């Protein structure tokens, strides 16, 4: 195992071994530092779901993050970063609850990248932003379709 303080620089071209290492590091931090369970998702999507308040006394975890198993490892890293951003946003009294969906999505992208950086995983910023823009675009489109 590598020194934990060592920064891992990753992009979609990074070797699969390093990518797996980066993904492991992020999920381990999320599980041990934040008490969130990271699980495989079989429904073709990734999401964050907080533990309902009435169950908080019974279970240890504050929520779960599911990561779509069909994603390649680089995309899994991008997805887990985004989903943990939702967790941090949920903690925020001002912006967590009633903000517009697109604003919340944007903040989750921002907060997630910031978190994984702090634990020593540097995701290629250009690729992260590209992925973010793609997802935001899909959100905007699906919201417009709902309005029709
Ligand atoms: Zn999201």
Image (cartoon, helix red, strand yellow):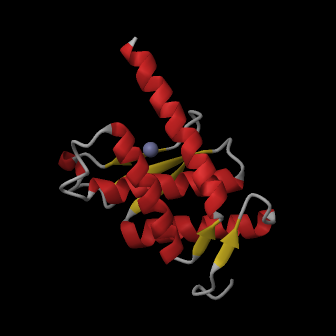
Residue at image point 43% right, 71% down: 32
Q: Do we see residue 139 in this rendering? A: yes
Q: Where residue 27 sits in the image (x, y, percent)? A: 53, 64
Q: Residue at position x 59%, y 85% from top? A: 4
Estimate the x, y position of residue 50 in percent, counting from the top left.
32, 49
**Quadrant that contains the N terminus:** bottom right
Write down which quadrant ligand 1 falls in: top left
- Location of the C terminus (image quadrant): top left
Farthest residue toward the top?
Answer: 148
Res 23 → quadrant: bottom right
> How many callouts does the rendering have?
0
Whole-percent x, y for residue 70 in the image: 68, 41
Residue 145 image-quadrant placement: top left
60 displayed left or right of 56: right
Residue 27 vs residue 108, the one in the foreground: 108
Q: Position of residue 121 (x, y in %)?
A: 59, 72
3 or 6, which is in the foreground? 6
- Residue at 47% from the left image edge and 24% from the top image edge: 142
Left or right of 45 in this view: 148: left
Q: Is residue 102 above or below residue 91?
A: above
- Residue 62 visible in image: no
- State the residue at coordinates (70%, 55%): 73
As displayed, is residue 114 above or below residue 139?
A: below
């Amino acid at each position: 195992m590598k020194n934990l303080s060592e920064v891992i620089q990753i992009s979609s071209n990074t070797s699969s071994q390093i990518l797996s290492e980066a993904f492991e590091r992020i999920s381990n931090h999320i599980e041990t530092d934040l008490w969130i369970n990271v699980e495989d998702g079989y429904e073709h999507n990734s999401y964050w779901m907080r533990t309902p308040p009435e169950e908080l006394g019974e279970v240890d975890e504050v929520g779960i993050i599911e990561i779509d198993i069909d994603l390649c490892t680089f995309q899994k890293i991008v997805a887990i970063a985004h989903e943990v951003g939702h967790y941090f946003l949920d903690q925020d009294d001002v912006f967590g609850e009633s903000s517009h969906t697109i604003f919340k999505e944007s903040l989750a992208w921002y907060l997630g990248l910031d978190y994984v950086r702090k634990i020593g995983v540097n995701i290629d910023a250009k690729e992260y932003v590209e992925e973010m823009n793609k997802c935001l675009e899909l959100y905007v489109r699906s919201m417009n379709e709902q309005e029709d």
